[in-house]
Amino acid sequence: RALVDAAFSEEEDDDEGSVVVRASGRAFDRHGVVASVEISWTGSRWFVATLDALVAKATWSFTWGDEPWHHFHGPPPPADRPNYNISLRVSDDSGNLAVFHGLNARTSPGEL
């Protein structure tokens, strides 16, 4: 079983005029270490978050829209819809995988 929480924010990139999405949070694994955290807002494409370390209580972060090549891999969450749904996919060092659907951009806690 794993626990996750997350915070999401959007800002406009002054240089490009595009939206930059930032997400961060924590993932916990009770019997091993968190090996990866992925985030999706499309329901079909997953993007890898950055882990601070491979530990049982890991913090993660994710930024989308701050690199020119990002638009080749799909649009960011719509800036005009503050309640879009986010999914997180967390795996541990034993290959266990848990997916939490329906995290709202304005709410954070979830249990997998």
Image (tube, grey):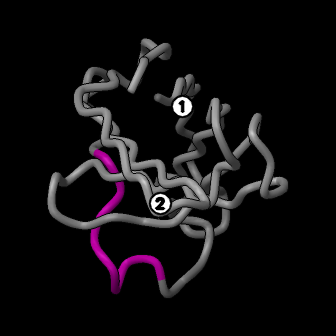
Compared across the picture, whether 14 is left or right of 58 comes to left
Q: Is residue 45 above or below residue 26?
A: below
Figure quadrant of the C terminus: top left
The answer to the question of whether label 2 and label 1 lie on touching residues, with beta carbons closer than 8 A, is no
In the rendered image, residue 69, in percent from the top left (x then y), is placed at 49, 87
Q: CA distance from mark 2 to mark 1?
A: 17 Å
Q: Quadrant of residue 92?
A: bottom right
62 left or right of 80? right
Residue density around tag 1, few if under 14, some if 14–19, many if 20 or more, within 10 Å? some
Tag nearer the camera, 2 or 1: 1
Give the magenta-colored segment's residue range.
70-77
- The amino acid type, in three-letter code, at marker 1 is Phe
Mark 2 lies on a secondary structure that is loop
What residue do we see at 46% from left, 78% from top?
70
Up-down relation of residue 95 to residue 4 (above or below): below
Q: Which residue lies at the image location 47% right of the left edge and 48% below the top edge?
A: 90
Q: Amino acid at mark 2?
A: Ser
50 over 5 or under it: above or below: below
Position of residue 36 measured from the top left corner of the image (x, y, whole percent): 57, 59
Secondary element under disc 1, as helix, strand or loop, is: strand
Residue found 43% across the figure and 17% down from its top = 110
The residue closer to the viewer here, 28 or 79, is 28
Up the image or down, 101 lies above or below 77; here it is: above
User: Which badge, 2 or 1, comes first in the chain's sequence?
Assistant: 1
Residue under label 1, please give it.
Answer: 8
- The percent position of residue 109, horizontal first and vertical second, equals 49, 13
Magenta residue check for 100: no
Horizontal side, residue 28 vs residue 43: left or right: right
Residue for badge 2: 18
Q: x, y (%) of residue 100?
A: 31, 33
Q: Could you say which is closer to the camera, residue 90 or residue 8?
A: 90
Please count the marks in the image: 2
